[in-house]
Image (tube, helix red, strand yellow):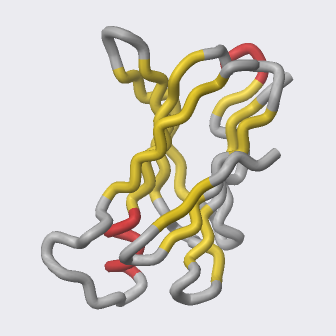
Amino acid sequence: MGKISTHVLDTTRGLPGAGVQVELYRVDATARILVKEDTTNADGRCSAPLLEADALVTGKYELVFGAGAYFAAQGVALPDPPFLDRVIIAFGVADASQNYHVPLVLTPWSYSTYRGS
């Protein structure tokens, strides 16, 4: 059975992004539905998959990361408003039997993602 998981890497500090608020939404033609909220642990990961097994269906999803609040909590001097406040990664699940690991590599000024396993 497939799953959606994530982790955050803070490349400014060269450390896992611990304490980042993460929201997962399922998106369809008429609604954006909050599926799960979590906060990354000391390793920058959510402690469990955000969605798995029969709860994972094909379709469109969004992961939303609280980047601005995370960097503010780290004492990083940010402009007001911060350049990156909430990072939204919109992605699709074409095969619900596969794993969709969607990491976020983050600085206050940039981010990157990829599909992991």
State which quadrant residue 109 falls in: bottom left
Residue 22 in the figure: left or right of residue 81: right
Instruction: Tell how many labels.
Output: 0
In the picture as drawn, the residue positioned furthest to the right comes out as 1
In the picture as drawn, the residue positioned furthest to the top comes out as 30
Q: Residue drawn at (75%, 19%), measured in percent from left and top?
A: 95
Q: Residue drawn at (86%, 22%), measured in percent from left and top?
A: 1
State which quadrant residue 44 falls in: bottom right
Residue 101 in percent (x, y) is at 72, 45
- Residue closest to the eye, 4 or 114: 114
In the image, residue 55 sits, relative to residue 45, either above or below, namely above
Q: Residue drawn at (64%, 55%), measured in percent from left and top?
A: 103
Residue 60 in percent (x, y) is at 52, 23
Residue 78 in percent (x, y) is at 25, 83
Residue 36 in percent (x, y) is at 52, 35
Q: Residue drawn at (35%, 89%), measured in percent from left and top?
A: 75
In the image, residue 79 sits, relative to residue 104, either above or below, namely below
State which quadrant residue 59 falls in: top right
In the picture as drawn, the residue positioned furthest to the left comes out as 80
In the image, residue 108 sits, relative to residue 77, either above or below, namely above
Q: The C terminus is located in which quarter?
A: top right
Residue 87 in the figure: left or right of residue 6: left
